[in-house]
Amino acid sequence: MAISTSTQMDFTVWAIMDQPPPQVFEAVADPQRLSAHFTTGGAKGRMETGATVTWEFADFPGPFDVQVIRVAAPDLIEFDWPRNDGTGANRVTFRFAPEGQGRTRVTVTESGWDAMPEGLALAYGNCMGWSMMLAAMKAWLDHGIVLRQGMFR
């Protein structure tokens, strides 16, 4: 967790997948693939620059919109999504980098949390969520195992 001089915090988590960058990129960009391991209530719309897509989780109430800011396949997906306290949106950046032969390092950075106790508590929750997402994506991509189903309910 880093605290910037602008009174906002960000965090970065990462994992290495045993698949090449284009396949790992598609596991996030393609709504059917994303729904298989992360958005268990479904995802609608492909992650493309300027798009608004909808994500839903079976274990959290209601669908919500995600505003896609920038996509550079197979290297980057950047989007804004609503804060879970209802006070605005945070920026999330996925980076997909080759990590040796046929492997990919996926880095997820989320920024925009207020550098206050409430913001820190919410950031910790999302940090856990993105770490879990990467673990679920690895299990699904590398081993065909779905981890998220029933994890939070």
Image (tube, grey):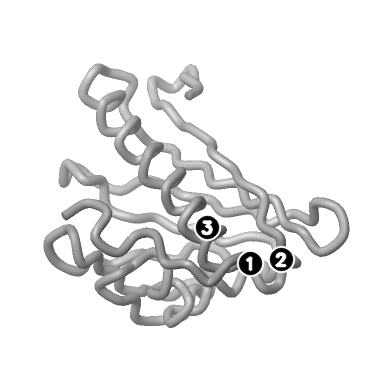
Which image quarter: residue 26?
Answer: bottom right
**Residue at point 68% right, 71% down?**
73
Q: Position of residue 16 (x, y in %)?
A: 67, 50
Q: CA distance from mark 3 to mark 1?
A: 15 Å
Disc 1 is placed on an element classified as helix
The residue that label 1 is drawn on is 24
**Residue at point 40% right, 81% down?**
45
If the image is split into quadrants, where does the C terminus sit?
Answer: bottom left
Q: Dots 2 and 3: beta carbons under 8 Å?
A: no
Closer mark to the observer between disc 3 and disc 1: 1
Closer mark to the observer between disc 2 and disc 3: 2
Using the image, tell me which numbered label, if any, was put on residue 19: 2
In the depicted view, which residue is nearer to us: 88 or 13? 13
Q: Position of residue 66 (x, y in %)?
A: 34, 64
Q: CA distance from mark 2 to mark 3?
A: 21 Å
**Residue at point 51% right, 52% down?**
134
Q: CA distance from mark 1 to mark 2?
A: 6 Å
The residue that label 3 is drawn on is 78
Marks 2 and 3, the one that precedes in the sequence = 2
Residue density around tag 3, few if under 14, some if 14–19, many if 20 or more, within 10 Å: many
Residue extending furthest left?
61
**Residue at point 42% right, 26% down?**
9
Marks 1 and 2, the one that precedes in the sequence = 2
Give the answer, above or below, for where 92 lies relative to 127: below
